[in-house]
Image (tube, helix red, strand yellow):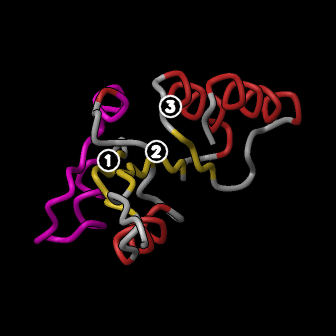
Amino acid sequence: MTQTREPLGVAVVGAGYWGPNLVRNFQASERFRLRRLCDLDVERAQRVLGGYSTVQATADYAAVLADPSVDAVAVATPAGTHLDIALAALRAGKHVLVEKPLAATYADGMRLVTEAEERGLT
C-alpha cells in the first residue's frame, strides 16, 4: 500500500534572475505547494506569479517565516544575502534550499550545514 503525502509547503525568496525558475518548477510538481513568493519588489513578484495566481506575493520575510503552511524556503537572492536569509529560515524551523553558491565563504557554508544538522533540518 502506498502512502500519499501532503505536498510540502514552499516559499521562494527572490523573484529576480533564478527565482522564476524555482516558482515554475515548484508549481509544476505535485510534491510541493508554492505558498509564497517573497521579494523586496512585490510588483516584480506579482508579475512572476501572474494575474491568476493564488500564491501570496510579499516583501515581508518575517511573515513568510511565521507562516505554518511554509515547511521549506528556497533562496534565490544575491549570494551575499544567502547566509542571513538561510540562517533565519533554519532558526524558524524551515528546511532550506539555497541556490549556488551556498554562501560567500566555506566557513559561512559550514555554519548553515551545522545549523541544519543541529535542528534536524535539510
Q: Which residue is at 23% across, 54% downward?
A: 43
Sequence-first disc among 3 and 1 = 1
**Front residue of 63 and 96:** 96
**Mark 2: amino acid:** Ala
Is residue 101 shown above or below 106? below
Label 3 amino acid?
Answer: Ala
Q: Residue at x 42, y 73 (%)?
A: 1
Q: Amino acid at mark 1?
A: Asp
* Front of the two marks 2 and 1: 2
Label 3: which secondary element? helix
Dot 2 corresponds to which residue? 72
Q: Nearer the viewer, mark 3 or mark 1?
A: 3
Q: Which mark is residue 41?
A: 1
Q: On the rendered structure, is 121 left or right of 111?
A: left
Location of residue 4 in the rendering, given as x and y in whole percent from the top left corner:
36, 66
**Residue on which disc 3 sits:** 89
Distance in Å between CA atoms under marks 3 and 2: 8 Å
Q: Residue 68 at x, y = what percent?
A: 29, 34
Residue drawn at 22 percent across, 59 percent down: 46
Which is nearer the eye, 42 or 25? Answer: 25
Q: Residue at x 28, y 33 (%)?
A: 67
- Quadrant into which the C terminus falls: top right
Q: Is residue 56 magenta?
A: yes
Q: Residues within 10 Å of mark 2 (few under 14, many from 20)?
A: many
Range drawn in magenta:
42-65
